[in-house]
Amino acid sequence: MSFLTPLFLLGGAAIALPILFHLIRRTTREKVPFSSLMFLRQSPPRVTRRSRLENIFLLLLRCLVFILLALGFARPFLQRPMAPYPAGSNLRQRIVLLDHSASMRRSGLWDNAQDRLRDLLGASATDEVALLAFSRQVTTLVDFEEWNATPQSERMPMALDRTRSAAPGWGDTDVAHALVTALERLEEQATKEVAGHREIILLSDLQSGAHLEALQGMEWPTDIHLRLETLTPKQEGNAGFQALPDQPFMPGAARDETLRIRVQNASDTDQDRFQLAWKQIDGETALGPPIDVYVPAGQSRVLSLTWPSNAASAASLVLEGDPQDFDNRHFLIPPRDQTHPLLFLGLDAPEDPNALLFYLTRAFPGVGGQRIEVVARTGDAPFPADTLEKARLLIVSGSPGGDAVDRARRFLDAGKTVLHVLRSTNDAPALGRLLGQTLTLTEASLPNYAMLESLDFRHPLLLPFADPQFNDFTKIHFWKVRQVDTNGLPDVQVVASFDNGAPALLQVGVGDGQLFVLTTGWHPADSQLALSSKFVPLLFAFMEVSGSLSFRPDHYVVGSTVAAPDNLQEPSWKVRRPDGTEVSIDAGQPFTETDTPGIYTILTTPPAAFAVNLDWRESRTSPLPEDTLEQLGLPLTPPEDPDPLQTAAEKQAWHATELERNQKLWQWLVLAALLVLITESWVAGRLSRAPVGEAGG
Amino acid sequence: MAQTASPAPGASGGTATAAHLIHPQTLISIRNLELRAKVVVEGFWAGLHKSPYHGFSVEFTEYRQYTPGDDTRYLDWKLLGRSDRYYIKKFEDETNVRCHLLVDNSRSMDYGSGPVRKTDYANTLAATLAYFLYLQGDAVGLLTFHDDIRDYLPARHKTGHLRHLMLALEQPAGGAGTDLARPLERITELVRKRGMMVLITDLLAPIETLEAHLALLAAAGHEIFLFQILDPAEIDLSLDQAALYRDVETGRDLYVDPQQARRAYQERLAAHETSVRETCRKLDITFLRLSTQDPLELALFHFLRARTQQGRRVRRAGMTRRA
């Protein structure tokens, strides 16, 4: 029998303790009260002639407990030849995640990554390895099958060769996505018998701008380890900048409007003076004098720039003075004036506060470079043809007179949306002509006022109000309400109704379009609607529902998908990339090859340009603190992974450990110790119930 | 001369036979202290008729010539009518002795190797004496103590006083140690008039200062009785077990093998007793050592006998002076 931890056998010496205690004659532990000890002196322990051990059986039991425990802790095992491991069972499965995001373009990083990769693959020639490159997306360079199918000697050259084709692009670093993908690959591979460990090796510069959000709350498998191989650039520090993404341009901005730019500087740099210069998109021709920027290390500054007057349809902004130049150029498109027309037919005077139009024209401030233009006409006056073509929503106020109702009906037939606001019971003919049938209107008799009571918050119009925070309409009082008899109307939907049961807002499908009927006005004579906080959101909801608001962003980050143009007639559409090549895409499919920063052009008539830039987070190149990953619960292993079985002694020790682990003799010894202990307690209990003088120990 | 007695159970100082004596164990089974005292005293009276000391009484009746200032209520009008002389009649029930019982109530008194604890015995003895003296019309006071004064009832002879006294005696033992000096000092301060002092204690405390305090008390003219109450186990260390013994007062633990320690113990106890007796002899104090197995009637008997002898001595001394 051999022992794994023979030092514990020394614990067997503890049997001396029970022997000693048994040798010492037990003096009474009881304390007998006596009135006064003033006449008494300490008696010396009585010397008995019997120095023999008492209660030999109990002593033997106690010694046995110590011996069994000492043996158990010494981890005994029986030496026997171990069956050799099944072939391949000490395989390690490794996925190497190679970062090829834009920040890897920094000086020396990529070479460093390749060197490390060479070392790693060299040490893993007998393992199962997959090599994945990642930035925003994950690209498989070598998968497990291909690796296994390749002869061992050719595996590393093949992998390195693949790596050369995956040089750093312009994507941002989505570490979370890469790790999750790698985990999935390992789990797919887990069906194979793997006795060795599985690990993911992350070969990255691990910048603080890396995306880790998806890792939060993720439960990492316990048997898969993560090893970080952090790459350090030759030169630290980096500055980057972004056009602030919330509102790049003010509504209705002209080219000379200001543009807010945030310049940020890394904390590990000495550089703090930079220049921002407007240039043509070729990056060479300057469009104006550079602007000095002072950003201390670790801080950021926001400055307002003016769009260069001599710029063409697109320009680039270049940060000078930053040695890490992968993120020093930003492409910008001047703001497009996106105007959405809203047609109004009615006799309302624009400046009459008792009319509908007064509130309508004031309801739409310019938001985010978009503007809603209210185009109002009386009954006979026609709308401009292009506006009519572009408009998706027409509001009819009461009975506008002339052929207005017919024009509204044609608008409906064209598949567009009309909102008819009933001003009085006299509007019954106009509404009847819109609906194509005769109906009557009555003025609802209200005791004092009416409130909206039943609202269909599932309807797209009211969906923005569905949140309990916004769904209180009871503060809006309605003084005048027209009652529409909906019985004769086919395909009618009551979107909202008053507390007296009268419908407030109806939706009726007419022709290809949708007719909404509001049975009250929003002006003060009818209600408080125009003055309530619900009015503007409601009008926007009408614009949304009618499809009036179609917005196409001008600026994307690398890796984004660009949706196809709305009014596409052809079976395919084309995009011209910054390098001049044209890509043809099927209609309905998005454009996904936004892999390079630059100005892309959608070749429609007229052509529409959009800019693709580096994700601003990629500029945050300060190293990510390692404990960030630990906080996310990732089981990090140290970077060095020495082979546990290098020397013969180590192999022998490992062999012994395995034998002991298989035999687990210690469990039986501890169990035996417990049984002996129970017996000892029982025997001692019996003896202690016997007269005191008989018990020993 | 100090009267000393250390009667063995059943041994009688006179003709009172063991048949009339009640064993303390039987007596202690009576829960009420006052009843216990009554049983002892009345049993004692019953035995007294057969005693050669029949007729003993502390009571004394006399006529005294009236002097201005005396209460005219006590004038013997009949005598005045007959003899035309003014005499004050002293009534039989008039208080003439003021007795203070000083009872040790310390923890060590709580010890009892048998069913009778020393404190029970001491309290019964005190109650018996109080009851007896009360019946005679004497004023009885009480001072119980441990390491401090615990209760003090001044000497009175009035209705209900005996009841209070019994209640005070029924308090359980307490305190930590035994301090004999403090109660003696205190009683010396409190009681200015001459009277009788009965100290009931186990005397299991250092007695270095005892002599000085007793001397002070004796010098004040008090008649002093010292009862030492000991448990039989304390007298001959009749413990059978070698064990760790704990001093109930100090909490000190000591491993004692009674077989080994008995001789030395008895020697030290005897030396202690000798020292106390010597002190009592010097100060003319009556010392009585009682075991908790001794019948209480015997204690009472010895008490009375000592008093009688003392009374005779006083009278003899008076006659000598008159002669």
Image: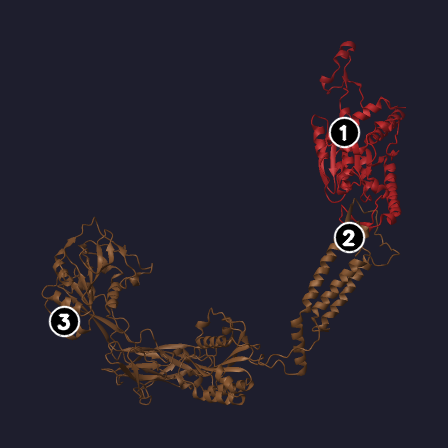
Mark identifier at residue A383: 3
Residues indicated by labels 2 and 1 sit on the same polypeptide chain: no
Q: Cα distance, mark 1 to mark 3? A: 130 Å
Q: Colour of chain A?
A: brown
Residues indicated by labels 3 and 2 sit on the same polypeptide chain: yes
**Chain to which the residue tagged by mark 3 belongs:** A
Q: Is A628 rendered above or below residue B199?
A: below
Provide residue B213's location: percent of width, then percent of height: 80, 40
Q: Amino acid at mark 1?
A: Ala
Residue A225 visible here:
yes
Q: Are marks 1 and 3 in contact (CB under 8 Å)?
A: no
Q: Name the image colouring.
A: by chain
Q: Is B271 rendered above or below residue A523?
A: above
**Chain to which the residue tagged by mark 2 belongs:** A
Q: How would you rate the neighbour count of disc 1 (Cα within 10 Å): few for under 14, some for 14-19, many for 20 or more?
A: many
Identify the image quadrant of residue A557.
Answer: bottom left
Identify the image quadrant of residue A20.
Answer: bottom right
Q: Colour of chain B?
A: red
Tell me the residue that label 2 is attached to: A687
Provide residue A118's location: percent of width, then percent of height: 52, 87
Taking the image as shown, residue B32 lies to the left or right of residue A324, namely right
Q: Earlier in the sequence, mark 3 or mark 2?
A: 3
Q: Cα distance, mark 3 to mark 2? A: 114 Å
Task: From the image, state whether disc 2 or disc 1 is nearer to you.
Answer: 2
Tell me the residue that label 1 is attached to: B37
Query: For the residue labelled by badge 2, is the local secondary structure a helix, a strand or a loop?
Result: helix
Taking the image as shown, residue A610 lies to the left or right of residue A88, namely left
Tell me how many marks there are. Answer: 3
Q: Cα distance, mark 2 to mark 1? A: 49 Å
